[in-house]
Amino acid sequence: MIIPPKLTFLGFGEAGTALASGLIDAGIDDIVAYDILQNNFDNVIELEAKARDVKVHLASNYKNAVIGREIIISTVTCTEAVTVARAVSPHLRAGQIYLDVNSVSPETKAEIGSLVMRSGAFFIEASIMSPIYPKRQAAPMILSGPNAPDIIKRMAPYGMILEDMGPEFGKASATKMFRSIIFKGLEALLQECVVAADHYGVAEKVLDSITHSYPEIGWDKLASYFMERTVTHGTRRAQEMEEVAKTLRALKIEPFMAEGAAKRIAWLADQKIKEALDGKTPKNYREILNALRLQ
């Protein structure tokens, strides 16, 4: 009989909630989470309700979140990944596994790994390689680090799709960073295209023209998908592109595209489109453009 691991999630936003709910459905019944937003009264009620729905216990602090846990999974924002690792590292113990799935540069992952491993805990870097929903814990991940085979063996029975990229740190995070140049770069390109075209009332015509040239891609649906992602998660996605730029600079490659994409994505995120839509998620790019026109 396989005894399920005791898990902790550091950060309980979109990724943490999705992974935790999927793992609970797959048979892991002992999951703890801690999110720094619990210290904010405006957020704690929402987090407590989410935890009840998912059947996750909320710890009161970092120490209580990790003590006695087998696997700790960091699903915070890229700007907080190092801070959280530094805060939790004094409470880690030898033999624990710390899995960092945040979208950060290889250099940032190395800093996190150094903080974790000085405690005697094992560090594994991971990159999620698809949208977290609807697959949840089955969203494919790639892993780097000498202990990657251990967590693959431990978590495979619970539906996690984990690929070992080898013992060398940096490969998993680099793959995610360079992939983001394409995906988030396209997100920024489509946004800039349709926002500008809408000033002349030709956004639909432009996308229709592109579709005639590349009919295998549904450009209007793609524009709607990416712009909704920007509206909903744009601040985080822009920060992730800044991590891409950091990766490129470390290679002495000027991050022209990465920096531009980060600025473009951040711009739309700052427009507070959801507030203009009374908190509703926009159904398509046209709703976003209409909201921008009213500003």
Image (cartoon, rainbow, N blue to C red):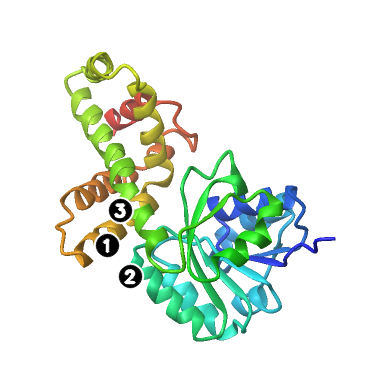
- Residue 147, percent from left and from top: 55, 70
Q: Secondary structure at mark 3?
A: helix
Which residue, given by chain and number where applicable, does mark 1 sit on? 247
- Name the side, left or right, on which 260 lies relative to 294: left
Which residue, given by chain and number where applicable, does mark 2 sit on? 107
Give the mark, 1 or 2, whose residue is nearer the N terminus: 2
Could you tell me which residue is drawn at 36 percent across and 21 percent down? 218
Which residue, given by chain and number where applicable, does mark 3 sit on? 241
Q: Classify mark 2: residues with Cα within 10 Å, few (<14), some (14-19) or many (20+).
A: some
Q: Secondary structure at mark 1?
A: helix
Give the mark, 3 or 1, whose residue is nearer the N terminus: 3
Q: Kindly give the residue lying farthest to the right in the view shown.
A: 1
- Residue 58, percent from left and from top: 68, 65
Q: Classify mark 1: residues with Cα within 10 Å, few (<14), some (14-19) or many (20+).
A: many
Residue 49 visible in this rendered orientation of the protein: no
Query: Disc 1, disc 2: CB below 8 Å?
Result: yes
Q: Kindly give the residue lying farthest to the front in the view shown.
A: 166
Where 257 sits versus 72, above or below?
Answer: above
How far apart, in angstroms, are the residues tagged by discs 3 and 1?
10 Å
